[in-house]
Image (spheres, rainbow, N blue to C red):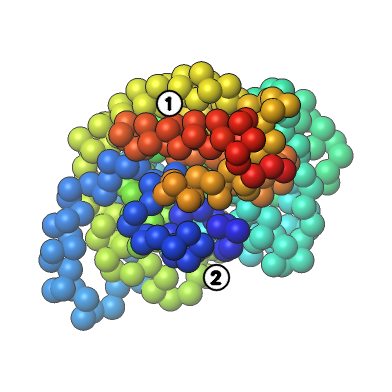
Amino acid sequence: MLERYGHGGDLRTASEVFGRSAESFDDFSSNMNPLGPPPSIRNVLAGYLEHIHAYPDPASRALKKTLANRHGIPENAILVGNGAAEIIDLAVRAIRPGITALAMPCFDEYGDAVRKLGGEIYPIPLDAAKAFELGEAEIGAAIERSGADLYMLGSPNNPTGRLVDSGLIYRLLDSGAYVVLDEAFLSFVPDEGKVTLVQAAVQHERFIVIRSMTKFYSVPGIRLGYAVGKPSTISRLRKLQVPWSVNSLAQQIGEAALMDAEFEARSRQWLVTERKWLTDELRRMDMQVTPSEANYLLLRLPESSRLRLSASQLQLEMGRRGVLIRDASRFQGLDHRYIRVAIKLREQNERLLLALSECLGAAKDGSGDSA
């Protein structure tokens, strides 16, 4: 099992399982921007030795100022954290919900954070026939039946890549519940400035928006994210955060990355083109591809009585060929035929398609493993 720790991108486990060096894999199980990190980060790394002797700023003030200017919000409405995972944990601890409603499938960390505090989960099942879109019917039913005091949603959702309509968020807030909206992948959306709800979060004490900087800027090794909310709400989260949660290198990298407008524009342009190309190619292989606004695609293996191959088996067959994919059947609400793949550069995407073609062809011919 490659998702030994519940996530993709575990190259050490992949190396142990397949007996290959970590560098030899094309990793489609991790959703990082293949154009990154931005060139500006190299300058930060080159000069960091001059700063490593000092404690980091415990309030990440320079980075918060940069973020505040970008979003047009007060600095005290922002909390910088050690990746989105820390912010999720802090938000749940601050709210302490009895019942949390989750639109499933979704990021496992949501439910894990709730269960650590003994909270209950109310699942809102997303329908594959509706391309996993969260709609008015699902939200209305949840408000009526769940008794949830917290709704935690991803926009774009992981693993589906679907955005959440802002009208649904406001309806949930009007119901009296808290809403935590995870916008970790929203930076990949071309008009994200118009779609993000960070400014709305500043105005509402029961609304928190979470952003990640590691995916878009391709720096997952440093762990960097932030929360936006009403200053009084952010203050509650800050009191629960351990001191020096965000190291000084992460703070400097965040500042530098946010200044690189050319990198941002190039990344969004790349994704629009490459996502359409890869989607079209996968559909030619009879894959069911969920429409996505993010830098990853949720796929269901072709419907064929001759193809007796599960997601976990395909993951192993692909790994033997040096290509890592996510076994999406591990997300609650998805069956054994779902996988998730990141979108990468054309040459890498072509290798993904070749490996998929080989594995699926072998399964149809009867030479691969059967379920």
Q: Which residue is mark 2?
A: 240
Image quarter for residue 42?
Answer: bottom left
Residue 212 in view: yes
- Do callouts 1 and 2 mark residues in contact (Cβ within 8 Å)? no
Amino acid type assigned to the residue bearing label 1 in the image: Leu
Q: Position of residue 360 (x, y in %)?
A: 56, 33
Determine whether the residue tagged by mark 1 lies in a helix, strand or loop.
helix
Q: Position of residue 359 (x, y in %)?
A: 53, 37
Q: Position of residue 226 (x, y in %)?
A: 44, 54
Q: Which residue is mark 1?
A: 278
Amino acid type assigned to the residue bearing label 2 in the image: Leu
**Residue 147's disc number:** none
- Image check: 109 left or right of 234? right
Q: CA distance from mark 1 to mark 2?
A: 43 Å
User: Crowding near pointer 1: few (<14 within 10 Å), some, many (20+)?
Assistant: many
Determine whether the residue tagged by mark 2 lies in a helix, strand or loop.
helix
Q: Nearer the viewer, residue 116 or 228?
A: 116
Q: Residue at x 27, y 41 (%)?
A: 35
Residue 94 in view: no
Q: In the image, is residue 33 above or below residue 270?
A: below
Q: In the image, is residue 61 above or below residue 34?
A: below
Q: Residue at x 25, y 32 (%)?
A: 266
Of badges 1 and 2, the one in the foreground is 1
Q: In the image, is residue 268 above or below residue 238?
A: above
